[in-house]
Image (cartoon, grey):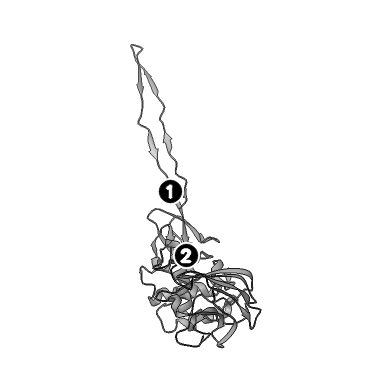
Amino acid sequence: MKIKGLFHIVLVCSISACGGGGGSTTNTVETPVVVEPPTTFTGIFLDSAVEGLHYQTSTNEGMTNADGEFMYQTDEMITFSIGGITFPAITAKSVMTPLDVLTTQDINDINVINMLRLLQSLDFDGDANNGIQIAQAAHDVSEGVSLDFSSAEFDNQVETLLASYGGFYQQLVSSEMAVYHFEQTLAELNNQEIVNCDSTHSSVGNYGYFDTIAHGVSGRAEIIDNCTIKVTEFYYDGRGPQVNFYVAQDHDYVSEDAFAISREINGPSYENAEFTLRLPNGKTLDDFDTLSVWCVEFSASFGELVFTP
């Protein structure tokens, strides 16, 4: 947290002299007055760092920058908005997320989920891993719009906006992917110790190389510890819809037991990219032995591998 502008202005009154009949001099010294101006802080708004989110306090107004930063003073209320979509006013602090804005700790609250979906769907390049960039066009097309995040019409309302926006997404990202991405952000933010994330499992160290099936997918993946897979040297043209890293037993990615371990990676192309993939809560290395770049919409694998010693 950056603290700016903390200084003291000390006003010292002059010493006055009064002459009397006896020629004596009286010196009067007034007590110095110390004036402390308000202290301005820099906060950050996170899903990923959200750029282009309008904010307003009683003393500051602007757009969050590429690092998600905004300016505020102690005990100020802050209001975030996108065009006419105005979020509840809340006391500003150094790090803020949709949980803070909606005053809940329940990541599965429908209002939280839909706020996450909105922010990630407005990400102009479709890759929330490099931050969420909300373009000015989002504010323009949202003028006069209000949203009820718990409404059954939420999806239709936002997808109408997305059609006019011109960003990557034409449909809202799924609830599952929005929450998954946010969970990774929270884990990094809190530097959380992941339960049982040591290196005791027999599969730790197993790795494989993707067999290319479509869209130029290639790369290497290795199981780093009980909770983590590292993908390196990754190539993918980004042209498939609803694509995630998926794991399964014996390449059965349509099984009810298969599951995603990343947010959607459709959007930009990837060249020699790296990903750190965390297992969702309740999942272990016993639940899979293969990995795919999986297109959910068409139930198609663009590339897959087997983890072997």
Tell me the residue that label 2 is attached to: 46
Residue at (49% x, 82% y) in the render: 248
Q: Amino acid at mark 2?
A: Leu
Q: Nearer the viewer, mark 1 or mark 2?
A: 2
Point out residue 114 in the picture as x, y percentages from the top left corner.
Answer: 44, 76
Confirm or deny contact between disc 1 and disc 2 (CB under 8 A). no
Residue at (37% x, 55% y) in the render: 75
Q: Nearer the viewer, residue 115 or 136?
A: 115
Check disc 2 and report its element: helix, strand or loop: loop
Identify the mark nearer the N-term, 1 or 2: 1
Point out residue 14 in the picture as x, y percentages from the top left corner.
Answer: 41, 27
Residue at (50% x, 72% y) in the render: 119
Q: Amino acid at mark 1?
A: Thr
- Does residue 37 lie above or below 204 as drawn? above
Q: Is residue 61 visible?
A: no
Image quadrant occupied by the C terminus: bottom right
Instruction: Tell whether 143 sits left or right of 88.
Output: right
Give me the disc on residue 282.
none
Instruction: Tell whether 231 sits left or right of 5.
Output: right
Separation (CA) of disc 1 from disc 2: 23 Å
Check disc 1 and report its element: helix, strand or loop: loop
Tell me the residue that label 1 is attached to: 39
Choose top left, top right, bottom left or bottom right for residue 195.
bottom left
As drawn, the residue found furthest toward the left would be 22
Choose top left, top right, bottom left or bottom right for residue 147.
bottom left
Point out residue 202 in the picture as x, y percentages from the top left corner.
Answer: 46, 72
Q: Is residue 152 visible?
A: yes
Instruction: Tell whether 99 sits left or right of 161.
Output: left
